[in-house]
Amino acid sequence: MPGSSQQAQKWKDDEVFFSHALAMQPNSAISHNNYANALVKKGLYGAAVREYQTAISLKPDMVRPYANLVLALSKDGKMQEAFNTLAEAMNRFPENGELYFSLGSLYAMQRQEVLAKEAWAKAIELDSWYVQRNLIGIQNEINARNAARQ
């Protein structure tokens, strides 16, 4: 199918794909969240932050954009804002393992290992499957970086 390969080439970039999805569904929190994820991959943290904030305003009961917003803020060097955003999210969703995983990650970035381990232990208690999936992803990322260095 010649049309399929042309379409595949067109969508080879996540940002292009998700910006198209966003154009088709501008009021979709999921579309804003996914587009923001593509922006983060490109290091466009400020733009990603705005997209995550839009996703949150469209669907404030969805946890994932909060966790992703925290990550984008931290990657952009805005640690205090990341902690503040996470505190707000944890007040809304006090028993969410994903948010405790994010808290552990923020502490680890600040080399506060004891607090990081405590937060990660709580994340495992609340949602071990989420933590396991993320640890596998982190290990794959580390392996890819190591392979690229060799």
Image: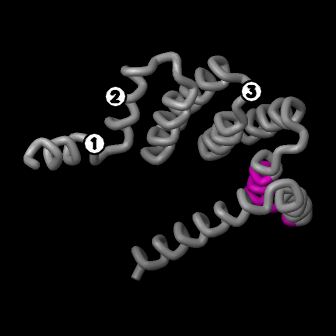
Stretch in magenta: 101-113
Q: CB atoms at circles 1 and 3 under 8 Å apart?
A: no
| Picture coordinates of residue 77, whole percent (x, y) | 65, 42
Q: Earlier in the sequence, mark 2 or mark 1?
A: 1
- Which numbered disc covers residue 11? 1
Mark 3 lies on a secondary structure that is loop
Q: Is residue 26 above or below residue 108?
A: above
Q: CB atoms at circles 2 and 1 under 8 Å apart?
A: yes
| Picture coordinates of residue 84, whole percent (x, y) | 81, 33
| Picture coordinates of residue 72, whole percent (x, y) | 61, 41
Q: Distance between the residues labelled 1 and 3?
A: 30 Å
The answer to whether residue 87 shows anywhere in this view is yes
Q: In this view, does 49 lie above or below 149?
A: above
Depth check: 138 or 27 in front?
27
- Queried whether the magenta region covers residue 111, the answer comes back as yes
Q: Earlier in the sequence, mark 1 or mark 3?
A: 1
| Picture coordinates of residue 101, whole percent (x, y) | 77, 54
The answer to whether residue 47 shows anywhere in this view is no
Residue type marked 2:
His
